[in-house]
């Protein structure tokens, strides 16, 4: 496995699969590497905590960094190239470009985290230009992110396929996330209630209002949103087909997100 800090050094053969990450790798990331390994000749992962996608009062400064362990895992899972750019290489002092995607960024996480998806779109545009992958592998845990990046790929004519993988969960249902490391042991006990609540909504057992009450009763501090939207357009005026339940909620200082397909959706 080769580790590169400069994109000009990247040497790739055949079909290139790309897994962009912010590090602190877990089973969700590794499932993406696994999928890329099965489908591509060269697997490239990037580790870059992108300042452009964090808001002023968010967790950029304390975002977990476990580079040595990440590199070991990537090697074990057959990754060929790890790209670890520095912040100053990605954003020089004179950097002056921004990207804004409208529509699909204006709901759910985009409504709560101003300009978050502009930052994601910006870094992925740079990474796509640097790595030049054939396929990008992304996780359905960040469903809205996948929709936003599909829009970016189509609108800016990137010649890149997107392949998504289902959410990888702990045995108790909590979706793997680098941010789960922030949870205290007590919060970790409460966290799986997020998945339980949306599963019950998806099965038609409880309403969205009841899900909010359930989460607060179980110990969540607040619910940023819980909504049923069309999974392709993220609009609320959809038929019963293609609907998904989306949630973001805060547990202590940790913000957790999750989503699940509505039962009965085709
Ligand atoms: P991050 O390092 O959080 O930016 O995530 C990098 C990639 O891993 C994104 O495409 C995420 O959607 C994906 N990912 C994160 N957690 C999971 C999970 N539990 N299951 C599947 N994919 C995930």
Image (spheres, helix red, strand yellow):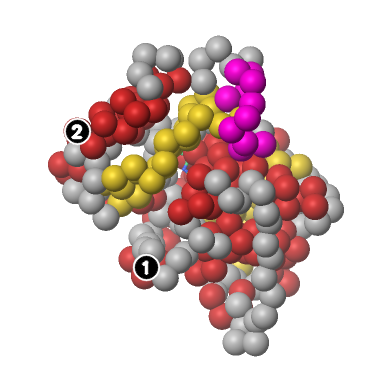
Q: Residue 217 carries which label?
A: 2
Q: On the rendered image, what quadrant is the N terminus found in?
A: bottom right
Q: Position of residue 25 (x, y in %)?
A: 43, 50
Of residue 185 and residue 214, the one placed in the foreground of this image is 214
Q: Within 8 Å: ligand 1 and the Cβ of disc 1? A: no
Cβ atoms at labels 1 and 2 below 8 Å apart = no
Residue at disc 1, secondary structure: loop
Name the secondary structure under disc 2.
Answer: helix
Residue 171: tell me if it is visible.
no
**Left or right: residue 193 compared with residue 164:** left
Relative depth, front residue between 198 and 38: 198
Task: Determine the main secondary structure of the stretch shown in magenta.
Answer: loop
Task: Tell me the number on the disc at residue 57.
Answer: 1
Q: Residue 28's spot in the image, x, y percent?
A: 47, 40
Q: In this view, does 232 lie above or below 86?
A: above
* Residue 147 belongs to magenta span: no
**Disc 1 residue crowd, few under 14, some 14–19, many 20+, Cα 10 Å:** few
Q: In this view, does 264 lie above or below 91?
A: above
**Mark closer to the chain start, 1 or 2:** 1
Point out which mark residue 244 bears. none
Displayed quadrant of residue 191: top left
Find residue 45 and report its image quarter.
bottom right
Given residues 260 and 176, the one toward you in this image is 260
Magenta segment boundaries in residue numbering: 233-243
Q: Which residue is drawn at 66% across and 49% down?
A: 103
Q: Which residue is drawn at 55% across and 12% down?
A: 264
């Amino acid at each position: 496995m080769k580790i590169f800090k400069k994109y000009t050094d990247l040497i790739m053969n055949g079909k290139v699969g790309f897994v962009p990450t912010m590090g602190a790798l877990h089973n969700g990331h590794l499932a993406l590497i696994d999928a890329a390994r099965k489908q591509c000749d060269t697997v490239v992962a990037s580790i870059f905590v992108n300042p452009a996608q964090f808001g002023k009062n968010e967790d950029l400064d304390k975002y977990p960094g476990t580079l040595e362990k990440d590199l070991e895992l990537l090697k074990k899972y057959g990754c060929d190239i790890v790209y670890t750019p520095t912040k100053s290489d990605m954003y020089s002092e004179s950097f002056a470009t921004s990207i804004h995607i409208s529509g699909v960024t204006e709901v759910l996480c985009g409504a709560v985290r101003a300009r978050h998806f502009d930052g994601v779109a910006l870094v992925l545009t740079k990474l796509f230009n640097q790595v030049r992958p054939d396929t990008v592998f992304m996780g359905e845990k960040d469903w809205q992110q996948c929709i936003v990046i599909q829009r970016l790929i189509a609108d800016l004519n990137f010649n890149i396929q997107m392949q998504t993988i289902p959410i990888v969960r702990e045995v108790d249902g909590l979706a793997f996330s680098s941010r789960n490391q922030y949870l205290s042991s007590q919060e970790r006990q409460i966290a799986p209630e997020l998945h339980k609540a949306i599963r019950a909504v998806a099965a038609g057992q409880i309403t969205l209002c009841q899900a909010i009450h359930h989460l607060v009763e179980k110990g969540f501090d607040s619910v940023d949103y819980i909504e049923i939207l069309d999974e392709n357009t993220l609009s609320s005026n959809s038929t019963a087909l293609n609907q998904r339940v989306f949630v973001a909620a805060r547990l202590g200082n940790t913000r957790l997100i999750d989503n699940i397909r509505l039962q009965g959706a085709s």
